[in-house]
Amino acid sequence: MSPNPTSPPESPIARRVLKVESLTHESHDDRHVIAVETELCVRRSALATPRFHAALKEVADRVGTLADLLGPSTTVVRPGDPSAEGPPAEPPDYVPRRDGPLSQVEVWRLRVGASGDSIHHSRLLRELADDETVRTPDGDESVLPAISPKHAAILSPAAGGCPATPPAPAGNPGKPFIEPPTDGPTARVTILDSGYIWTDPPHRHLDERVTVVRGQWLDPVTNTWQPDGTDGLYTNPAGQLDGISGHGTFIAGLVSHIAPGTRLEAVGLRNQEVEIGVLDPDEQLGLFETEVAIAHAMLRRSRTDVIQCGFAFPTLDDYPSLPFWAVMQELRMEYAPHGGRVAVVAPAGNERSCRPHWPAALPSVVGVAATDPSGRERADFSNWGEWCDCCTRGADVYSTFVSWHGSVEGEPRDRERRFDGWATWNGTSFAAPQVSAEIARLFLEGNRSTPPADVADQLIESGKRSSVTDDAVCGSPVSLPYLQIG
C-alpha cells in the first residue's frame, strides 16, 4: 500500500477494493486515489526528455499507445441470458485515427522486482520531466503530467456509502413512469455504468428501449481485452445485495422517464477482480474499473448523441486523467461523431470534496454536482467546485430498480428490505443522468439540428439564472448553475 493513509473509507465497497492485491492506493481525508500497482500512463511527448525516458526504461516496459490498444468489437448481451453474447453492437464501434490524440498517451508496465509501486514511480519520474500545457479543440487549457499511475474507479465512491447511501425501497408510481417507445425520431444515450438487469417482474417499456453492450477490460498479463461481467443480483460475503447492483438499471429508468424519445445503450463495466470466496475465482464481484477501460468504452461507443459516464475518481496530485484527456481530444475532432460535438456528462462524485474528480473535471465534459430535493442547497454528500459545470437534484431521486428481499450492503445485516422494482437513491451519479436526459430531450425537441454538446452549453447557460452557492466544501463560495429538470 502507498504511504499517507489516514482514516479508512466508510464505504464497504471501497474498503473491499482497497484490499485487492493488484491495486495500490493513497488515502486522504477527502479522497482515495486508487491505482493499478504495476501500470503507468505516460504522456508521449515527455519521452523526448532523455533523463526521464532512460529512468522509465530502467523500471518499466512499454505496452503501447492508447491508439494501439483497441479491443475487439463490442458485443450485445442477450436478454434473459446475460452470459450469452449476441452479434456485434450497433452502430459499429468508433475507430480513432492511429496518429490522433490517442497516440499521445502510452501504457507502460513496471517490471517484476521493481522497487515501489505505480504511485511511487510516478512521483519520482515526474521530477525528471516538465508538465505540459495543452489546448483542447474548444480552446481550453489543461496541464498534463509526464506520467501517472493507471487509476482505478468505483461507481462514484463515497465516504459514507456507495454511491452516497444504500438504495431505499419505494412504491409503485401508480401511473406509467416510462412511456412505450415509438417509431418516431429518437435520441441515443449511451450509459457507461454497471450494466442493466432485466428484472422480474419486468420494466417492460424500459426493457424495450435498452440494448446492453458488454464492456471490456485490458488483461495486464496477456495485453488482450477481455469481456466484463454483467450486472446482476450479486451479494457480499454476508449475503447482502452489493452496493452497485442495479445502479445502471436505476439510471436507465431515470433517463427514459425524463426523455421519452430516447433509445438507450447500457455498457456494462464491472471488472471481475474483487474476490469474495476463499481461493475461488468464480466467486468474485466486479466493483471497479480502470480509467483506461472506461475511457476505451467511451471512445468505442461514441457513435451516439449523449454519453452518460457513471464514474468519478480522483487522481494523483489532482492532475487530469491522461486516458480521458486523450479520448476527449479525439471526440472533439471534426472527424469524430457529430463533428466532434457528442455531449459527455459525468458525476462530480460523493466525497464531500472540492478536489477535482475525473472525467467530470475535464473542460469538454459536463461535470454535475448534486443538490438537496429543494434545489436550493448542495446535497451534503456532493463534491463541489469551480471544476463542476452545473448542479441538479441528486438526493432522494426516484427510479426503476430490481426486485430484492433481504438486507443491503451499507446497512445492518438484520435490516430486511423489500424492493419490488422501485427505489429512491442518493448520489451525484443520479444527478448526472438527469442532465444527460435533458440534453437528449432538448436535442430531439430541436429536430436534432443543434449538436448535442452545443445543446449542453445552452442548457448550462440557462441554469445560471438560479445558481446554487455553497462554501462548506471549498471554504469559499462557489456558485454553480442549477438545472431544474422534470
Image: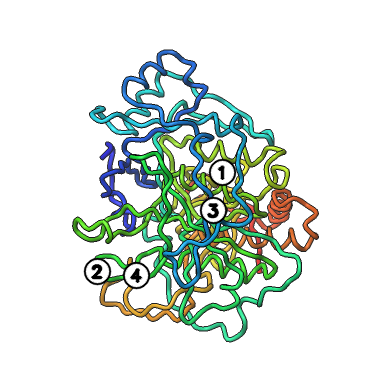
Where residue 370 sits: x, y (%)? 54, 58
| Res 314 → quadrant | top left
Which amino acid lies under the numbered mark 3 shown in the image of this protein?
A: Cys
The amino acid type, in three-letter code, at marker 4 is: Leu
Q: Tell me the distance, in whole angstroms, between the alpha carbons under discs 1 and 2.
A: 39 Å
In the drawing, what numbered circle is on residue 387?
1
Residue drawn at 53 percent across, 65 percent down: 251
Residue type of the residue flagged with mark 1 = Trp
Residue count near mark 3 (Cα–Cα under 10 Å), binned few <14, some 14–19, many ≥20: many
Classify mark 2: residues with Cα within 10 Å, few (<14), some (14-19) or many (20+): few
Residue at left offset 52%, top offset 29% = 144
Q: Are marks 3 and 4 in contact (CB under 8 Å)?
A: no
Q: Secondary structure at mark 2?
A: loop
Q: What residue did someone put label 3 on?
A: 309
Q: State the mark number for residue 241.
A: 4
Q: Position of residue 346 (x, y in %)?
A: 55, 52
Q: How many marks?
A: 4
For the N terminus, which image quadrant?
top left
